[in-house]
Amino acid sequence: MILARDFILPYRKAVAGAMTALVITAGITLSLGQGLRILVDQGLATQSPDMLARAIGLFFVLVLGLAVGSFARFYLVSWIGERVVADIRKQVFNHLINLHPGFYEQNRSLEIQSRFTADTTVLQSVIGSTVSIALRNVLMLFGGVVLLFVTNPKLASVIIFGFPVVIVPILFYGRRVRKLSRLSQDRVADVGSYVGENLAQIKTVQAFNHQPTDRERFAAVAENAFAIARDRIRQRAWLMTIAITLVMGAVGIVIWIGGLDVIAGRISPGELAAFVFYSLLVGVSAGALSEVIGELQRAAGAAARIFELLQTTTEIDPEATGERTLPDRVRGDIEFRNVSFRYPTRTDVAVIQDLSVNIHAGETVALVGPSGAGKSTLFDLLLRFYDLQQGQILVDGIDSRQLGPAELRRCFALVPQTPALFHGTIADNIRYARPDASLEQVRAAARTAHAHDFIQALPQGYDTPLGDTGLGLSGGQKQRLAIARALLADAPILLLDEATSALDAESEHLVQQAMPGLMAGRTTLVIAHRLATVRHADRILVLDQGRLLDHGSHDELLDRNPLYARLAELQFRAGGPSG
Ligand SMILES: Nc1ncnc2c1ncn2[C@@H]1O[C@H](COP(=O)(O)OP(=O)(O)OP(=O)(O)O)[C@@H](O)[C@H]1O
C-alpha cells in the first residue's frame, strides 16, 4: 500500500529501532512475572534477606530495562507518526495546489480541508501510537498465554475455557461504547459548526434580532449532544462494572483453585503469583486490543480518503514544461483563433462559440456583454485554467498549449473583481507575485496604484497584518492593493476584472486614477463596467452568449450596435472622470 511504500519505508531504520524496543519491552514485561515468582519463592518464602535483596536487584535491572526500552519505543514510534504525517501533509498540499481549478468545482473545498486536517490527524494518532499499542498487546497476549501454560498447564486450561465468558460481554459493550462515542463526536462537531456559522455572521444575526431563535436551536443541538453523551457514559459505566466483576471474579477463582494447589503443596506460592500476574496481563491486553481495532479501521478509512486525493490527476499540470518557451521580453500579442469552449461540468452549453480576434501588443481592449456572456471565461482560458475543445489561443504567435502553464502565466497579471488578499502584511500581499521585491519597489508600486497614502495612514504602515480576507480594508483599498500587486508583477499582459458595485465614488475615482499607470506599456484586457473604462479603451469587444458580436470604439458601437447601446445605457455607471 502507498502508505507503507512511499511514506514509512524511508524511515525503515527508525521503524526497526521501534520494533526492537517494542519486542524488548514486551519481553521484559512478560519476564516480570518470572521475577515475581522468584521474589515470592526465593526472597519471601525462604525468609532470607540475601535472597530477597538479590530478587529485588533483579527486579530493578528489569525495571531499568523497561524504562529505557519504553523511552525508545515511545520516542521512535511517535516520531515516525509525526514525521509520516508531516510528509503526507506536504505531499497532499503540493498536489492540491497544482490541481486544475475545475476540480474544486466538483469537490467542496470544506470537505477537502477536513480530509486534509482531520484525516491526517487520525493517521497520525494511529501511526504514532495505536499501531504500537496494538503490536505490544498482541505480543503480550500471545506471550502471556504461552507463559500461562508454561507456569501451570492445569490452571491455564481453566483460564482458556473461562476466557470467552469474560471477554464476550466486554467486547459486546465495548462495541456499543465505540459506536456511541463516534456519534457523540459527530454531535460535538455539530455544536462547533453551529457556533462557527453564527459567530461568523454575527452582524446579520443581531441585525435581524435572530438571537432568540438561535438560542433555541443551539439549545437543541447542545442537548442532543448531551443525550448521546449520556447514553455513551451509561454504556461505559456498565462496561467498567462488568469488566471489573468478570475479570476480578476470574482472578478470584484462579486464586481459589491455585490456592488449594499451594496448600496441597502441588505448586509454589510464587508460581501462583506469577500465574495471577499473567492472567491479568492477558486480560488487559485483550481489552486494549478490542479498543484499538475500531481505531485501526477508522485509520484505514482516513488513509483511503487521503490517498484518493493524491491519486486525482490534474488536467493541466503546472509543473509541466511545454515544448516551447517565450522570449525574455514578451511583446503581448494575443490571438484567439476559432475558439470554442464548454465547461467540463456542463458540456451541454457552449460558453464560447467560434471566437476569433486579434489583440495587438500595448492595446487596451474592453470586454463588454450581458451577464453570462463569457467574459470571465475568456480570462480563464487565457490563463489556461481549462483547455479548449476547439481552436487556439496564441501569445506572441505561440500556441498557449505548447507552453508550460507556468511559462504561459508569467505573461499575465490578474486583477480579479474581488481582490484576493492573503494572511500576511500589506507589503507581503503586494509582493505576492515577486517575493524578492524590495520595500522600495513595493512602495513605488503602491504609489502608482494610489495606495501609498492610505497604507501610510495605517498604524503599522506596510507592516500592517491583514486578516485572512483583508478584514479592516474598504473595497476600494483592497482593489488598489490588487492593482499594486499587478504593477509589481510587471507582466506584459494585464487582465483586469472591474469591480461592479463594491466601490463608492471616492474610491472609484482613486482606482480610476491608478489605471493609466497600470496599463501603460501593457496589453490590457478589461472586463468593463464603467463608462470611463470603455471610453479610454482602444477597442471594445461586444460579447453575447459566447460569440463576438462586434468590435470598435465606444462611439462607433453606440451608433451601430443596439445591444451595446442598451448596455451602455443600463450598465455603465459614469464613475470617475469620464473621458
Ligand atoms: N465553472 C463553471 N462551470 C460551468 N459553467 C460555468 C462555469 N463558470 C461559468 N459558467 C457558465 O458560463 C457562462 C459564462 O460565464 P462567465 O462567468 O464567463 O460570464 P460573464 O460574461 O463573465 O458574466 P458576469 O458578467 O455575470 O460575470 C455562464 O452561463 C455561466 O453559467
Image (tube, rainbow, N blue to C red):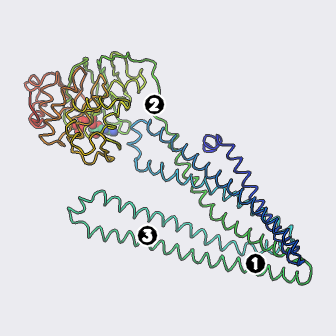
Q: Nearer the viewer, residue 120 or 300?
A: 120
The earlier-in-sequence mark between 3 and 2 is 3
Q: Which residue is mark 3?
A: 225
Q: Which mark is residue 342?
A: none
Q: In which of the image's four quarters is ligand 1 placed?
A: top left
Residue drawn 85% across and 72% down? 52
Q: Position of residue 329 (x, y in %)?
A: 34, 16
Q: Which element carries disc 1, helix, strand or loop?
A: helix
Q: Quarter-wise, where is residue 238 in the image?
A: bottom right
Q: Where the C terminus falls, by quadrant?
A: top left
Q: Which residue is mark 1?
A: 251
Decide if residue 569 is on the left or right side of residue 511. left
Q: Which element carries disc 2, helix, strand or loop?
A: loop
Q: Which mark is residue 317?
A: 2
Residue drawn 24% across and 26% down? 525
Q: Position of residue 333 (x, y in %)?
A: 29, 18
Which amino acid does the dot numbered 3 rest on?
Ala
Q: Which element carries disc 3, helix, strand or loop?
A: helix
The earlier-in-sequence mark between 1 and 2 is 1
Which amino acid does the dot numbered 1 rest on?
Val
Q: Is residue 557 above or below residue 396?
A: below
Decide if residue 481 is on the left or right side of residue 423. left
Q: Say whether residue 96 is visible.
A: yes
The earlier-in-sequence mark between 3 and 1 is 3
Q: CA distance from mark 3 to mark 2?
A: 45 Å
Q: Quarter-wise, where is residue 122 in the image?
A: bottom right
Disc nearest the viewer among 1 and 2: 1
Which amino acid does the dot numbered 2 rest on?
Asp
Residue drawn 43% across and 61% down? 189
Q: Furthest residue to the right? A: 265
